[in-house]
Image: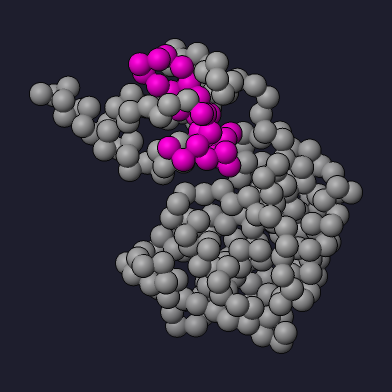
Amino acid sequence: MNCAIKMKEHIDATLRDPRWTQMRNRDKSADGSFWYSVRTTGVYCKPSCAARPARPENVAFHHSREEAERAGFRPCARCHPERARETLRYGIGTSPLGLLLVAQSEHGVCAILFGENAKTLEADLHRRFPHTELSRDDAALAATLAQARALIEHPDTAFHATLDLRGTPFQRKVWAALRAIPAGGTASYKEVALRIGMPEASRAVAQACGANALAVAVPCHRVIRGDGALSGYRWGVERKRALLAREARA
């Protein structure tokens, strides 16, 4: 009975884990953020592996390839999770609100970050994408940096670059709602929760805003407290105030 209970708990936890959905969807954008192993085959895989989906009772998630190998699993011969890590190119430039870093994967722009200096920006990028190789290339990212800067200088400008949004299904739902808030407009955390059909999720909405890696392209600065006050912003409340002021004048 104890074994049956433990197995049911494992299955329930696996099915609730956002990584299960990413694995089932073979989400390439999740590659490098976690790996999963399959007990019945003895292998570990990338989330995007094309192999037949494993049953939840046989799946375990791992933070690194090394962790999976220490647990006794070998690399999958189909998706080759042991091969070189994903490389992100990034560039750093100036903006009216401080230095700006833009990073891009093969799937699109995955980060737009504000910072005071290059060292801080690079540390932030590494923290957000710990399982990637980072390569600075200001020239290659110049056009994308210009587009990001234009969003600050001219808030009604469209951002045409493809976005590589990396997050849980819930976070992506929140970020889609943020992108629907027009320049010059704001919404409270409660209003965003209502818009995504989860009225009790205000706190989770705030957490999703804090996890956003795409400043201005995913405008989390347009979310404010219910009383109209400006609450915390990953890149500083004064930047948030300045962005909203620029948008109000546009």
152 versus 167 height, above or below: below
Vertical relation: 75 (above or below) 197: above
Residue 3 pos. (x, y %): 17, 22
Q: Residue at x 63, y 72 (%)?
A: 240
Residue 212 coordinates in the image, percent (x, y): 57, 57
Magenta residue span: 24-50
Indicate the quadrant containing the N terminus: top left, top right, bottom left or bottom right. top left
Report the front residue among 126 and 73.
73
Number of numbered discs present?
0
Residue 33: percent from left, percent from top: 55, 36
In the displayed structure, does residue 31 sit left or right of residue 245? Answer: left
Report the residue that reaches farthest toward the left: 1
Magenta region includes residue 46: yes
Q: Residue at x 67, y 33 (%)?
A: 86
Is 73 placed left or right of 106 in the picture? left
Left or right, residue 205 beside residue 89: left
Residue extending farthest bottom: 249
In the image, residue 9 lies at what x, y percent? 23, 34
Taking the spot 21% from the left edge, 27% from the top edge, the residue there is: 6
Q: Is residue 196 visible?
A: yes
Q: Is 194 in the magenta?
A: no
* Residue 235 in view of the camera: no
The residue closer to the viewer here, 55 or 102, is 55
Q: Where, by quadrant of the figure, is residue 23 drawn?
A: top left
Q: Quadrant of the C terminus?
A: bottom right
**Colour theme:** one colour
Query: Residue 248 falls in which quadrant of the image?
Result: bottom right
* Residue 173 in the image: above or below residue 139: below
Q: Residue at 52% of width from left, 49% of height from top?
A: 167
